[in-house]
Image: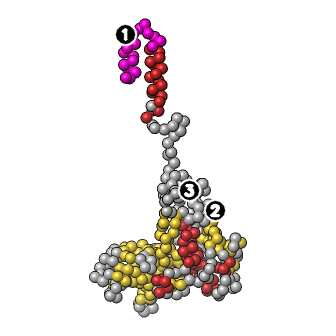
Amino acid sequence: MNASTFAGRTGTHPRRPAALAAIALLVASLAAGCGGGNGGTAGTRPDTSPATTDGTSGGTSQAPGDGGGSQEGTPSTGATPTTTPAGRAPRQVRVSAYFLHGEHVSPAPRSAASPGTAAGALRALLAGPTTYEKRYERTTAIPRGTTLNSVAVRGKVATVDLSGRYDDGGGSLSMRARIAQVVFTATQFPSIQKVAFELDGKPVTALGGEGVDVHQPVGRADFEDLTPAVLVESPLIGDTIHSPVRVWGSANTFEATFRLRIKDAAGTTVAYPYVTATSGTGTRGTFDVTVPYRTANTGTGWLIASYDSPEDGRPVIVDTIPLTLGR
């Protein structure tokens, strides 16, 4: 029975105002009890807080390693850190740990939990190369047993606090190599451009017995001599690729030109394109190309980066990356 039915009866029983008043009161009570159809409790609002990329409610999500002075392992948003809901595993993202191939940095794929991804990448670096990576001559200059105490990011600079073991042994080349490994691993994230170093919570201005200068934050450009002429950042050692494959990274070659060779399991060259970076001849530029190939021999293969010698035109190999080729 609705309100219009009651109103229609008002004119037929003018002598019962008390009964009508009681009925009107009942209708009002019933309407209030319906709660307007929103299913909520009086005085509350439904949760409209935005969801972060890991599916939790609350603060704003930012890029891995970003933030203003946040400690390792927490979202760097300046807001109250969000936590992973009970029973849900942390979101894993692909990162790179930069080891050494010869005397140059060489990235290898790793998985790290987000948020706190920069710290996860650095911990993967400190764990060292895998048996597979060692087989292909990937090494590390970082002393075994070095641990990460914390990472704090402010103004594009990551302050990396390592255990005192990091400073042990080795000459200037070994020390510069281990510094470069940390710098490249941290600066793969757009929110980090340079690295400042601490040992067991104390800022340091020099590392190693010969005193490699780190009194100011250092970046990738400070280690150009330890960077291969063509640094391939994807695909990485051990990756499985399919045609066409996207290849990207940075290069510093004569007139910014170099070549990428893909060899299949039979040793046959299945792609050998010229590539031009955004700059070269003393200035490192970037490149991002898609390379098609065709092979009947899937399985172990190679991506080989080289440039033509300006003296005699012969290819100068600057990096070799073992891969698994698919069609």
Q: Which residue is mark 1?
A: 12
**From what the image shows, is residue 90 above or below residue 10?**
below
Residue farthest bottom in this picture: 312
Residue 141 quadrant: bottom right
Residue 49 image offset from top left, x and y in percent:
51, 48
Residue 315 image offset from top left, x and y in percent:
41, 89
| Label 2: how many Cα within 10 Å (few below 14, some 14–19, many 20+) | some
**From what the image shows, is residue 138 above or below residue 109?**
below
**How far apart are the two marked residues, 1 and 3, measured between alpha carbons?**
64 Å
Whether residues under marks 2 and 1 lie with C-beta atoms below 8 angstroms apart, the answer is no
Amino acid type at mark 2: Gly
Nearer to us of marks 2 and 1 is 1
Identified at 62% across, 73% down, the residue is 148
Q: Is residue 188 magenta-colored?
A: no
**Whether residue 216 is visible:** no
Amino acid type at mark 1: Thr
The image quadrant where one finds the N terminus is top left
Residue 47 image offset from top left, x and y in percent:
50, 45
User: From which residue to which does the magenta span run?
Assistant: 1-19
Q: Which residue is mark 2?
A: 69
Q: Which residue is mark 3?
A: 82
Nearer to us of marks 2 and 3 is 3
